[in-house]
């Protein structure tokens, strides 16, 4: 088997890269170790920056997102019993975000890929990469007990944080930066109307809470929990009680509860691997970096990596010029680190840290107070939330 680009992983990064390359006439095959149903069963992020929306449009998969997604012009910060609106549109000169689930983005990309007749190998086992320091690397995997070899010119490592791409690189060639937070998010998905038209990020003495949504009839809620918490110990009733406690009285009173259709705990982590390119292997998305979800940046960063990488591969395909490919890692990392900073800052601002102490808590209160009193501070928050500009 042969393709110009072998893509490892059929998450949003791999599928979006595949779609952009396909439209530019660059052959690509995706090798994924899980089934399509498993990939679609994961409940992940839900907020798209304008830049991500534009890239999905460019990839030809924006129709359902525009029809069913919910454009948001702002969100609310809740603390000390009150809610304060962050007016994204007014603060950023007309920009906003689109609320549309990662699961739906993935479904749209899978359908487009099937329609284009591009190949995706699902349930590939023992995926490995060879020859990234040559001009003819290959990806090997086992399918139905047989070894397959996919020859290519480039490998795109889009296989998430636990994937093999980053792990295939010699440790001396890679530097990693990490912060693990001492808590996780317990998330619930329910077919109930969202408590409010906009997202609510709540800072409370018992911990952070977030009210988000997937549609006008489907809600996504989270509460901060200690890392040793077990999801089995959280009945729906316990979850709703805890969420209500952390919200302002008005939101608590209008919260519509119901049966959860998904409930899970995710740890929070900041992680960056540098560089993002090793010879003919290019990392994109969670394979190269993780952000805590507080800033809603994970999926958007994956999209911005894919934007840079697809443009670079298309440029090389057209002209043979490697300038863009050579610039990929540094260019992607500049945007990654700014999103890392923002995600860390939002997390620090809104969560209860076990070791914060009295001083830490007062600083947090002062920062929230500063934010609601200062247009400059709110502008900095808003311009990061809607997404910083691209460097091209
Ligand atoms: N071989 C092949 N595929 C693999 C391997 C492997 N060894 N390991 C993992 N994968 C697959 C996973 O099953 C998954 O489908 O790679 C895919 C990676 O997808 P994601 O983890 O969704 O990562 P990415 O596409 O970069 O998307 C980033 O998704 O995880 C969220 O919060 C994150 O929103 C962000 C976005
Ligand atoms: C979500 O809807 O899952 C979501 C929204 C905003 C965030 C994180 C998660 O910051």
Image (cartoon, rainbow, N blue to C red):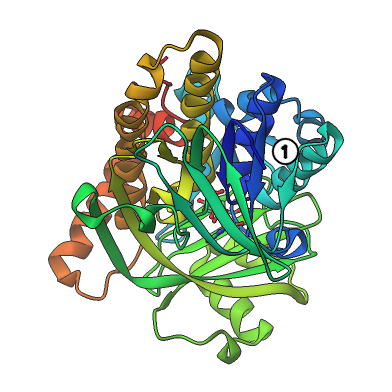
One can see residue 13 in this view: no
Vertical placement of residue 32 versus 276, above or below: below
Q: In this view, does 124 lie above or below 101?
A: below
> What residue would you read off at disc 1?
70
Q: Nearer the viewer, residue 375 or 133?
A: 133
Q: How far from the left and from the top, in percent, is residue 203?
A: 40, 61
Give the residue drawn at x 75%, y 43%: 119
Q: Based on the displayed image, in which of its 4 quarters is residue 53 positioned?
A: top right
Taking 384 as reference, is 244 above or below it?
below
Residue 385 appears at what percent x and percent y?
45, 36
Q: In this view, does 226 lie to the left or right of 147?
A: left
Position in image of residue 171 (x %, y %): 23, 56
Which of the 4 image quarters holds residue 112?
top right
Kindly identify the residue that appears in the image at 39 percent across and 42 percent down: 132
Q: Which residue is drawn at 18% across and 53% down?
A: 172
**One can see residue 299 in this view:** yes
Image coordinates of residue 181 in percent, x first then y, are 31, 67
* 383 sits to left or right of 35: left
Please tell me which residue is depicted at 70% across the width and 27% down the height of the picture.
22
Name the residue nearer the viewer: 269 or 186.
269
Helix, strand, or loop for circle 1? Answer: strand
Q: Of residues 336 and 89, which is closer to you in this image?
A: 336
Screen quadrant of the C terminus:
top left
Quarter placement of the N terminus: top right
Which residue, as the protein is rendered here, is positioned at the far left?
Answer: 359
What is the crowding at mark 1: few (fewer than 14 residues within 10 Å), some, or many (at least 20)? Answer: some
Q: Is mark 1 within 8 Å of ligand 2?
A: no
């Amino acid at each position: 088997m042969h393709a110009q680009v072998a893509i490892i992983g059929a998450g949003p990064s791999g599928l979006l890269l595949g779609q952009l390359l396909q439209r530019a006439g660059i052959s690509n095959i995706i090798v994924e170790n899980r089934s399509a149903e498993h990939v679609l069963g994961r409940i992940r992020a839900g907020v798209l920056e304008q830049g991500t929306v534009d890239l999905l449009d460019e990839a030809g998969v924006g129709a359902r997102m525009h029809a069913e997604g919910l454009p948001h012009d702002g969100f609310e910060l809740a603390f000390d019993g009150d809610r304060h609106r962050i007016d994204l549109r007014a603060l950023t000169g007309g920009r906003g975000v689109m609320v549309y689930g990662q699961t739906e983005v993935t479904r749209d990309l899978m359908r487009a890929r099937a329609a284009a007749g591009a190949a995706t190998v699902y349930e590939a086992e023992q995926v490995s990469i060879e020859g990234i320091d040559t001009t003819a690397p290959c990806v090997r995997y086992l399918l139905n007990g047989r070894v397959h070899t996919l020859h290519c010119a480039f490998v795109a490592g889009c296989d998430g944080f636990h994937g093999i791409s980053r792990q295939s690189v010699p440790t001396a060639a890679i530097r990693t930066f990490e912060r693990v937070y001492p808590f996780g998010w317990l998330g619930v998905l329910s077919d109930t109307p969202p408590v409010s038209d906009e997202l609510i990020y709540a800072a409370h003495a018992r911990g952070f809470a977030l009210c988000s949504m997937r549609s006008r009839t489907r809600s996504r809620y989270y509460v901060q929990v200690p890392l040793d918490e077990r999801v089995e110990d959280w009945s729906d009733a316990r979850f709703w009680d805890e969420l209500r406690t952390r919200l302002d009285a008005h939101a608590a009173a209008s919260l519509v509860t119901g049966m959860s259709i998904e409930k899970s705990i995710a740890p929070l982590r900041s992680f960056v691997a540098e560089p993002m390119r090793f010879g003919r292997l290019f990392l994109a998305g969670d394979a190269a970096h993780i952000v805590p979800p507080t800033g809603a940046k994970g999926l958007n960063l994956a999209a911005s990596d894919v934007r840079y990488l697809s443009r670079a591969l298309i440029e090389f395909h057209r002209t043979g010029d490697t300038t863009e490919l050579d610039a990929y890692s540094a260019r992607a990392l500049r945007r990654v680190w700014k999103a890392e900073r923002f995600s860390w800052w939002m997390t620090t601002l809104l969560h209860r840290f076990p070791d914060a102490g009295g001083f830490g808590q007062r600083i947090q209160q002062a920062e929230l107070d500063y934010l609601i009193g200062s247009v400059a501070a709110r502008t900095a928050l808003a311009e990061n939330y809607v997404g910083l500009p691209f460097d091209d």
